[in-house]
Amino acid sequence: MLIDMNDYLKTDFDMIIDTRSPREFEESHIPGSINLYVLNNEEHHEIGYLYKQVSKKAANKKGVIYILKNIASHLENNEFENKKILIYCARGGKRSESFYVILRQLGFDVYKLNRGYKAYRKYVSGYLQNIPNNFLVLRGPSGCGKSELLQNLNPSLDLEGLANHYGSSFGSKGKQPSLKKSG
C-alpha cells in the first residue's frame, strides 16, 4: 500500500527500511530506519553510469540482477514476520518498489512511502519553516554567503558554526555530504 507523509506520521511501524545505498543512508535518513539497500555504493554508481553513458535498458537489466541478489540476502538475514513495515528510497521509485513488491508477494504487512525520502525532506523543511517565533531555516549551496549572513544577524544561532562547520565545505572534520538540491 502506498502512503503519503500524513499517513506516515499517524502510523506506528515496527520496521522502517531505507533501500538506498549505504552512502545515501549515511548522509541522512528517516530517524529509526535501517539500511537494507537494494544497490550497494558500487552497484549504485555502476547503474548510474550505465543509465547515462550506455542505455536505460542496460542499466535496468544490470540493476535487476543486483537488486534480486541483495533482496535475497536481506530475506535470509532479517526477520520480517509479524511486523508492520514501511519502505522507502530516494523518490519512491524502482529501488523501494522492487523490495516492496517482493515483500507483498510473500504476504508481509508492508507499506511504501509515496515520493520516498524526498517527500520526508520536503515535509521536515516545511515544518521547520513554519515554527513560530521568527525561526528561519537558511539553506543554499556552499559558498553562497550563508555563514557571513548569520555572522551579521543579531540575534542568530549559527548551529553550523557551533559545530565547527562539520558537514559543510568549510569543515575539516569527517566526510562532507553531497550538495544535493533539497525539497
Image: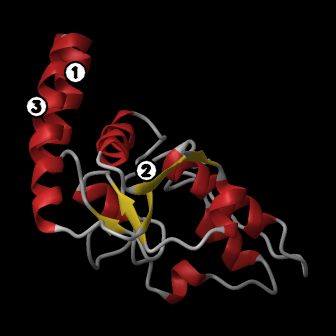
Quarter of the image for residue 55 reads: top left
User: What residue sits 22% from the left and 21% below the top?
Assistant: 60
Q: How many marks?
A: 3
Q: Is residue 42 left or right of residue 172?
A: left
| Residue 60 numbered mark, or none | 1
Residue 31 in sight: yes
Residue count near mark 2 (Cα–Cα under 10 Å), binned few <14, some 14–19, many ≥20: few
Assign a secondary structure to mark 2: loop
Residue, disc 2: 179
What is the spatial separation of the Cα atoms under label 1 and label 3, in whole angstroms? 9 Å
User: What residue sits 75% from the left and 66% below the top?
Assistant: 127
Quarter of the image for residue 18 reads: bottom left
Assign a secondary structure to mark 3: helix
Residue, disc 3: 65
Which colour assignment does the render follow?
secondary structure
Residue 40 in sight: no
User: What residue sits 53% from the left and 89% below the top?
Assistant: 162
| Residue 78 numbered mark, or none | none
Question: CB under 8 Å between callouts 1 and 2?
Answer: no
Residue count near mark 1 (Cα–Cα under 10 Å), binned few <14, some 14–19, many ≥20: some
